[in-house]
Image: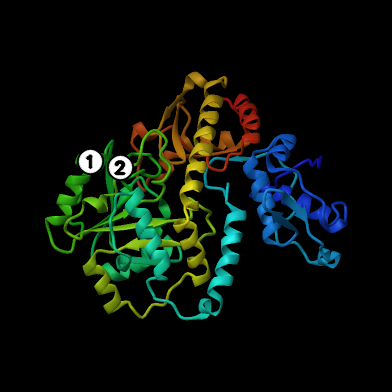
Amino acid sequence: MLTYTLKKAPGMPLYEALYRCIREDILSGTLPPGQKLPSQRSFAAHLEVSKITVEAAYGQLLAEGYVRAERRRGYFVEAVDVRRRSVPSPVHPAPEARAPLIDLTGQAPDGFPFSVWSRLQRQTLLDMGERLLQPMPNQGVWELRQAIAAHLSQFRGLHVEPEHILIGAGTDFLYNLLIQLLGRDKTYALEEPGYGKIHRIYAANAVPCVHAGMDGQGVAPEGLKGVQVLHISPSHHFPTGIITPMHRRLALLAWAKEAPERYIIEDDYDSEFRFAAHPMPAMASLDDAGRVIYMNTFSKTLAPSIRISYLVLPGGLMEKFQRELGFYSGTVPSFEQYTLARFLGEGYFEKHLNRMRKIYKTRRNQILATLKNCPHAGRFAVREQDAGLHFLLRVDTREEDAALCARWEAAGVRVRALSSFYHGQAPESDRHCLVVNYSGLQPEQLSLLARALEQIEIP
């Protein structure tokens, strides 16, 4: 059976390392045309990697034409012109010699269904043809909006019409669009602590902003004096992990209805990953006054490069958008929109989420077990909500947070402190807390993490 020693460069997923090894053997003739590749399961067991890693590598080779897939038979090497070997590789440069770095600060692409996605792309090209070149509605293609509406109804308890959905190229674009739609004369409230990029986007637009402090149930209405627009993530707040309970959600909805021109932007990012129970219904599903703007993205559930996000605008705001901002053209290519519509409509997204929940739950349990069995286990306390792809790790230490993070990075583990997400001084209860994002942690890195934890000294 094929055997490779996989070396992953910083920032390069393991599947890409495997893809490059197989591609090299195809181009060199080591793997001749017609040769059958090992089955995904047996190859994964042989290489001691996850089946998803092999599946992603095969999917990339399939998409680029190096192999073909035959139903119930497997993958076979295609005849490839060896002159393609002279084309420079667009992927990562050779890694520098350095200690392995485990990055627990951000998301990494993982488990993307390459084979399904590429097949749906081919079907879209064949079925749509020249229609892909035609102008599309500025809200996005009808098929995708219809598929999103069906998804929201089934999984978020949110019943909306496709006419109220607006597709955009990433949440950054949609944040800017909302500022233009709601107005720069309003005061916006952002969660404190919170995702720093949102604050920078509002600041770049010269929007008056305040930082709304949070208790254990999210933002309290009493702290919103003088605010017209509240931007929150009630289903799973980043970075604290707080899930806003029902009575607080109803209180915030009551606040929004107390005065005209008040709105809540419900950022439902990360809501799909809940392990112990179904996520709570979206706040927008409780809104009977048209005051909640719902937004979400496929960047977290599929891949960061899938720049497809969407808004659900109440009727009055959608009318205002078309009246005042309707001159904007759609920002997501129709080809990608039609492909995603098929992915949603044919049930592949649900299957993908179910598979990824199992993978991430296993990964979370593995890293928790690693922390529990390390020499410093008695100095650690985990805060989590069985949701999202991160948790908080409180460290019993006298060391300042910046020095604590530097100490971990020196041992090969990159982390961020919860206090770094505050714009002001973090309270004592949120100091010495590390935000552990495990979405990019590969199973083969667990042993490296265990060794790194043994090296870390905690004063």
Decide which of 390, 22 is in the foreground and name it.
Answer: 22
Determine which quarter of the picture holds residue 149.
bottom left
**Residue depicted at 66% across the width and 54% down the height:** 59
Q: Position of residue 360 (x, y in %)?
A: 51, 38
The residue that mark 2 highlights is 280
Decide which of 43, 178 is in the foreground and name it.
Answer: 43
Q: Position of residue 262 (x, y in %)?
A: 19, 60
Decide which of 7, 55 is in the foreground and name it.
Answer: 55
Q: Position of residue 21 (x, y in %)?
A: 78, 50
Q: Is residue 130 found left or right of 146 in the rendered image?
A: right
Determine which quarter of the picture holds residue 199.
bottom left
Q: Is residue 168 visible?
A: yes
- CA gap, disc 1 to disc 2? 8 Å
Q: Is residue 348 found left or right of 209 in the rendered image?
A: right
**In this rendering, is residue 399 above or below 293?**
above
Query: Which structural element holds mark 2?
Result: loop
Work out whether mark 1 precedes mark 2 in sequence or the reverse, and give the earlier one. 1
The residue that mark 1 highlights is 246
